[in-house]
Image (cartoon, helix red, strand yellow):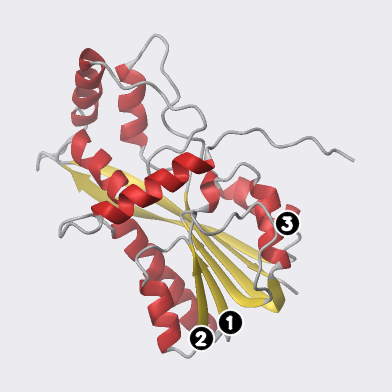
Amino acid sequence: MDTKAPPRIFSRQRRKAGYRRALVRQSQRDAARYVFDDMVEDVLDRLEFMRFEPAKVLVIGDWTGTLALSLRGRGSTVEEANVATIDEEVPLEGAPYDLIVSLASLDRVNDLPGALLHLRAALAEGGILIASIIGAGSLANLRRAMIAAEPDRPAPRMHPLVDNAAGSALMQRALFRRQVVDSRSLEVAFPSLDRLVSDLRDQGLTSSLSSAAPPLGKAALERARSTFLSTRNGNERVLENFEILTLTGWKD
């Protein structure tokens, strides 16, 4: 039996720091939250389509609080958790749950297969896991800009992301006998690289890599800005895509 620990790609402390900064930034009137608004709306639509009315729910990662509020309005008992209060890589307390929802959280754990196993174990029989993450088709212009900033030896600044095929394999490995993995695109227009980075910070979606890259120098930053703007449209905006990957699994 292979007991080798998974590689340490992400820093839990950096995830916590990013989450706390996002909460502070959200106190500002114009703070971005569109990624989470989209995820919450999608989860509610899925539950309505399935006509699923869970009695006991765990919501992980939704710092907006809107999903829990909506589910309570439908009669569910809801517990809320975030990166500061829960570690998905260890068994969950409070189980069993009829529904577990995870928003933009599982893509930044070191042992994703293990985390999915723990989430499945925390479900009641017939329970459902819905996990929405930022997928591999996201932020192509930002990635291009980061490579252009340091063409000779780019420092790791963006973490690896999961695609549909990998998501399906992970759900099967976590013993979900019934599972669906699908993706959708959320396209957002940006006037500058700085605005995109600001929006990511607003939503706690910046890098949580275990080794923090050094700040870009002035020349490297200008190369990144110029490369990002090279794809702007006639409205002087760069269209950036967030691929939202949703993993849905039933515990039979």
Q: Position of residue 178 (x, y in %)?
A: 70, 68
Relative height, residue 163 to residue 180 (above, below): above
x and y percentages locating residue 27 in the rendered image: 22, 59
Q: Secondary structure at mark 1?
A: strand
| Numbered label attached to residue 9 | none
Q: Residues within 10 Å of mark 3 (few under 14, many from 20)?
A: many
Tell me if mark 2 has few (under 14), some (14-19) or many (20+) residues whose alpha carbon lies within 10 angstroms of its own. Answer: some
Whether residue 246 is situated above or below residue 169 in the rendered picture: below
Image quarter of residue 240:
top left
Q: Quadrant of residue 235?
A: top left
The residue that label 1 is drawn on is 56
Q: Residue type at mark 3?
A: Ala
**Where does the N terminus fall, quadrant-wise?**
top right
Whether 226 is drawn above or below 75: the answer is above
Q: If you read the primary sequence from the N terminus, does the residue marked by circle 2 or circle 1 appear first?
A: 1
In the structure shown, which secondary structural element does the residue marked by tag 3 occupy? loop
Instruction: Please tell me which residue lies in front, 13 or 179.
Output: 13
Task: Give the CA separation, mark 1 to mark 3.
Answer: 22 Å
Report whether 191 appears left or right of 186. left
Q: Residue at x 43, y 33 (%)?
A: 158
Q: In the drawing, does residue 250 fall left or right of residue 19?
A: right
Mark drawn on residue 76 = 2
Residue type, numbered disc 2: Ser
Residue at the spot of label 3: 174
Could you tell me residue 105's position as x and y percent?
50, 53
Taking the spot 58% from the left edge, 82% from the top edge, the residue there is 56
Query: Quadrant of the image for the C terminus?
Result: bottom right
What's the residue type where badge 1 is placed?
Lys
Are the residues flagged by discs 2 and 1 in contact, CB closer than 8 Å? yes
Q: Is residue 169 visible?
A: no
Q: CA distance from mark 2 to mark 3?
A: 26 Å
Q: If you read the primary sequence from the N terminus, does the residue marked by circle 1 or circle 3 appear first?
A: 1
